[in-house]
Image: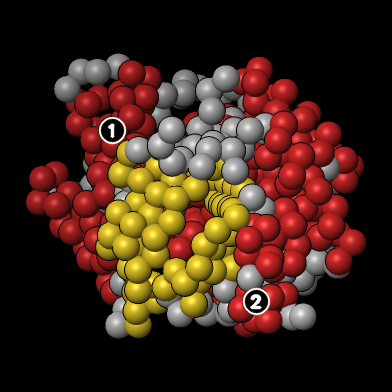
Amino acid sequence: MDALLHQILAGLATGGIYASLALALVMIYQATHLVNFAQGEMAMFTTYIAWSLINAGVPYWPAFFLTIGLAFVLGVVIERVVIRPVERAPVLAVVVVFIALLLILNSITGWIYSYTIKTFPSPFPSQPIFGRYLSPHEFGAILVTLVVLALLYAFFRFTPLGLAMRAAAQNPESSRLVGIRVGWMLALGWGLAAAVGAIAGMMVAPIVYLDPNMMGGVLLYAFAAALVGGIDNPMGAVIGGFLVGVLENVLGAFVIGNELKLSVALVIIIGVLLVKPSGFFGRVQVTRV
Amino acid sequence: MSALLELAGVRAAYGATRVLHGIDFAMEERSITALLGANGAGKTTTLRAICGMVRSEGAIRFAGEPIQNRKTEDIARMGIAHVPDGRGTFLHLTTEENLRLGAYVRKDRAAVARDLERVYGYFPRLKERSHQQAGTLSGGEQQMLAVSRALMLAPKLMLLDEPSFGLAPLVVRELFHILRAINQEERVSMLLVEQNAAMALDLADQACVIETGRMVLSGTAAELKRDDAVRRSYLGY
């Protein structure tokens, strides 16, 4: 029983990280109706930036926030420079751009930092504070995730800019008619998604270690989480993230073993797409004609 | 006094299909001008050209300033509010969020709050439904919402694209009554595209008739109502 509780709590910790990345995917999906396959590599690349900063002697938390800022800028620049020109291109062209972005970021990182695995520090104390159930880093990661989610929720729900971003994603034409600069809203969305991804990267790096391929698995779990929740529903993506994290951990520990853990994500993806493509919390469109 | 809105030789096309062959008209400040014409004559395209949603040639001036082919969002920020064909509702947002978006570019929060109450005064039904998802509103309510959203911009000019479309006659009468009140109380000029020519001519001060992308007739609403051709083609008696 103790072991199960431990696995569930640890699952919540990684689940929070999946939830953050899933949220980043959903944010881009809502605006473009496409899944950004490069989301994980963007997070990985920015985590390397954090690593460089910390190695250069910047204390953890300043490096943390600086990285978030740089990730935001990176997201905006990528949208403006790479995504904008293919805005009206067919779906496959955009997907190819996403994949190219993934490979480019992966290779650039390998080229700059080499492919050797590096350790990444955790900002949380190393001696256990909650006994045997949860390591301090896991607890801290859950906390950081919850703060990020609360901030994002408040931003989208209560600020005029958040409202304008939701409007621009839903109905660009009407948004322009009320004076919203839709192009900038999309760029802002990319920036926010990249920033959220960066946080996920910095939280997961102490667990999976830093290497250019570190986000491959995480992105799969995040994708599964977003699908479970309904790819257009931010709240669903978050719940899906925690669900997938727990499921992966519990199944990995007790049923299928750690080697097959990643296949949980793949089974979930295929299962959801076959049985309930809109996910469990996907939007039911209510319109009267 | 110069005209609030002036179009001179405006031409526009969708791809290879020319839709506007030369639209000329001017409208005075605070007036209501009706654009009449059959289906496909180019009325909607004229409105879309004014607010930069289709590229056009010729000249379009708003309060003396050329606005042709500027970005739609910049034209909106100058004070032109478009109530589009199909109402343009943000279906997944609430009624009140829709209205707040209308005032997105305004910085004066107190005035926006006042205008929100004023809009609810014109359309009490919207207040009852203020926290309801806008997609669940009836067609008439969505049209009221579209007019209200435009009003929240505190515009100088409203472009109304078939506000009567799909509405019951009683609702249309109510809506037109309120449009007249808005025109007089808020000093908003209106450019009205309508299939329902009789009602449009009752409401409007000035009117123009478009046929296959050309302006063929213009004058005061009263003159056009007496015009034989207009009567036969658009009023049906």
**Location of mark 2 (residue):** B228
The amino acid beneath tag 1 is: Leu
Query: Where's residue A192, x and y in %?
Result: 42, 40
The residue lying toward the viewer, choosing from A79 and A51, is A79
Decide if residue B47 is in sight here: yes
**Could you tell me which chain the residue with mark 2 belongs to?**
B
**Location of mark 1 (residue):** A70
Q: Residue at x 37, y 20 (%)?
A: A61
Q: Residue at x 23, y 56 (%)?
A: A82
Query: Where's residue B33, x and y in %?
Result: 58, 53
Residue A74: quadrant of the picture = top left
Are the residues flagged by discs 2 and 1 in contact, CB closer than 8 Å? no
**Could you tell me which chain the residue with mark 1 belongs to?**
A
The residue lying toward the viewer, choosing from B209 and B20, is B209
Q: 10 Å neighbourhood of mark 2: few (<14), some, or many (≥20)?
A: few
* Number of the front mark, 2 or 1: 2
Query: Where's residue A166, x and y in %?
Result: 56, 47
SS of the residue under disc 1: helix
The amino acid beneath tag 2 is: Asp
